[in-house]
Image (spheres, grey):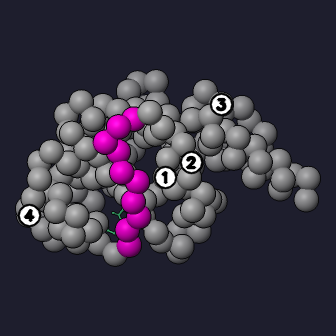
Amino acid sequence: MSAETAIYPGTFDPITNGHLSIVKRALTIFDRIVVAILDNPQKAPLFTLEERIFMIKEAMEGLHNVEVDTFNGLLVDYAVAKEVNVIIRGLRAMSDFEYEFQMALMNRKLNREVQTLFLVTDYKWFYTSSTIIKEAASFGGEVADLVPKIVDLKLKEKFGAAKNA
Ligand code: PNS
């Protein structure tokens, strides 16, 4: 187990500025961050796994010591396989708390060696989420200031294409 590395897991459908901010801040604590995308088609993501990997890699360009990886199954099993014992999660408004609390406790029940560390999201991103951003973008709302450039482009491509279909 290495305390120099932490896993930052999520669906990242798509990555937002809030996620990016958490990765940057986590890099001030840990030497290396593994951004781990859950590969779960049952969640019916807007973006394919490949699209999400591509967008994250683009958004992380210039950031050293970030690995982009995918996983399926239990997060704690993935952490053990990667020999990492810290999971980072960002906490936004109160509505996140119950879900995050449940998940952290379940992960702890499943493996007490793996610790969950919460970083409070920067106030600028406190009320944004991938879900709400997708909804706004789907109706033509401007979200360029909430997501990395590549994501804004891909959202416009996706929803522009849908509108023109
Ligand atoms: O970005 P999200 O959707 O909030 O991320 C949720 C994620 C991927 C971290 C969570 O669903 C997860 O870890 N799934 C893998 C299965 C698992 O281990 N669940 C937690 C214990 S039930």
Going 49% across and 47% down the picture, which residue do you hit? 57
Q: Which mark is residue 144?
A: 3
Q: Which residue is mark 4?
A: 112
- Which of the two discs, 3 and 2, sits closer to the camera? 2
Residue 66 lies in the magenta stretch: yes
- C-alpha gap between disc 3 and disc 4: 40 Å
For the C terminus, which image quadrant? bottom right
In contact (CB < 8 Å): disc 3 and disc 4: no
**Residue holding disc 2:** 55
Residue bounds of the magenta highlight: 63-72
Q: Quadrant of the N terminus?
A: bottom left
Q: Are marks 2 and 1 in contact (CB under 8 Å)?
A: yes
Q: Is the residue at mark 1 in contact range of ligand 1, meaning its CB lies under 8 Å from it?
A: yes
- The residue indicated by pointer 1 is 12
Residue 123 is a magenta residue: no
Q: Would the CB of label 3 be found within 8 Å of ligand 1?
A: no
Callout 4: helix, strand or loop? loop
For label 1, the SS is loop
Label 1 to label 3: alpha-carbon separation: 17 Å
Q: Residue at x 84, y 53 (%)?
A: 161
